[in-house]
Image (tube, grey):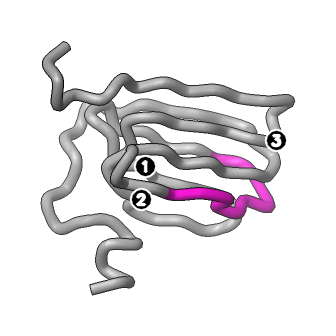
C-alpha cells in the first residue's frame, strides 16, 4: 500500500453503528440506504439511518441506525462527486 492510499476498514457495533474508513464521499443518503464512495464501492441498507460523522479529509464515516445489509460493487466511483460534495458546492 502506498503512502497516499488509506486502509479500508469496516466496523459494525451491534448492527446499530457502522464505522467505515477510506471513504472518499457519500454518493447518496436517506434513512434506508447509504451509497458510499470508496475504492471498493459500498452500499448500506437498513432503517433510521443518520450520519453521525463524515470527514473526507481523514476518510472516516460513522452511520447510526438499524443495519440490515452491506454490499460491495465492482463498479468504479462516479467522477461527478457525491451527495455532500454537490450539496456544499
Direction from residue 6 to residue 8 in the image, left or right? right
Q: Are marks 2 and 1 in contact (CB under 8 Å)?
A: yes
Q: Residue at x 46, y 53 (%)?
A: 35
- The residue range painted magenta reads 45-54
Point out residue 41 in the picture as x, y percentages from the top left corner.
34, 38
User: Marks 3 and 1, how far apart in space?
Assistant: 17 Å
* Sequence-first tag of 2 and 3: 3
Label 2 residue SS:
strand
State how many labels appear: 3
Direction from residue 78 to residue 23 in the image, left or right? right
Q: Which residue is mark 3?
A: 16
Label 3 residue SS:
loop
User: Marks 2 and 1, how far apart in space?
Assistant: 5 Å
Q: Quadrant of residue 10?
A: top right
Residue 23 to residue 84: above or below: above
Disc 1 residue crowd, few under 14, some 14–19, many 20+, Cα 10 Å: many
Q: Residue at x 31, y 73 (%)?
A: 85
Q: Is residue 77 magenta?
A: no
Q: Which residue is mark 2?
A: 26
- Residue 42 or 61: which is nearer the viewer? 61
Q: Residue at x 27, y 86 (%)?
A: 89
Q: Which residue is mark 1?
A: 36
* Sequence-first tag of 3 and 1: 3
Disc 2 residue crowd, few under 14, some 14–19, many 20+, Cα 10 Å: many
Magenta part mainly helix, strand or loop? strand
Point out residue 1 in the picture as x, y percentages from the top left corner.
19, 13
User: Marks 2 and 3, how far apart in space?
Assistant: 19 Å
Q: Quadrant of residue 55?
A: bottom left
Direction from residue 23 to residue 50 in the image, left or right? right
Amino acid at each position: 500500500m502506498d503512502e497516499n492510499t488509506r486502509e479500508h476498514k469496516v466496523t459494525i457495533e451491534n448492527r446499530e453503528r457502522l464505522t467505515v474508513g477510506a471513504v472518499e464521499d457519500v454518493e447518496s443518503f436517506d434513512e434506508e440506504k447509504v451509497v458510499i464512495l470508496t475504492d471498493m464501492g459500498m452500499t448500506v441498507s437498513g432503517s433510521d439511518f443518520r450520519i453521525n460523522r463524515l470527514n473526507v479529509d481523514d476518510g472516516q464515516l460513522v452511520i447510526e441506525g438499524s443495519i440490515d445489509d452491506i454490499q460491495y460493487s465492482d463498479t468504479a466511483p462516479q467522477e461527478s462527486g457525491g451527495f455532500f460534495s454537490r450539496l456544499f458546492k
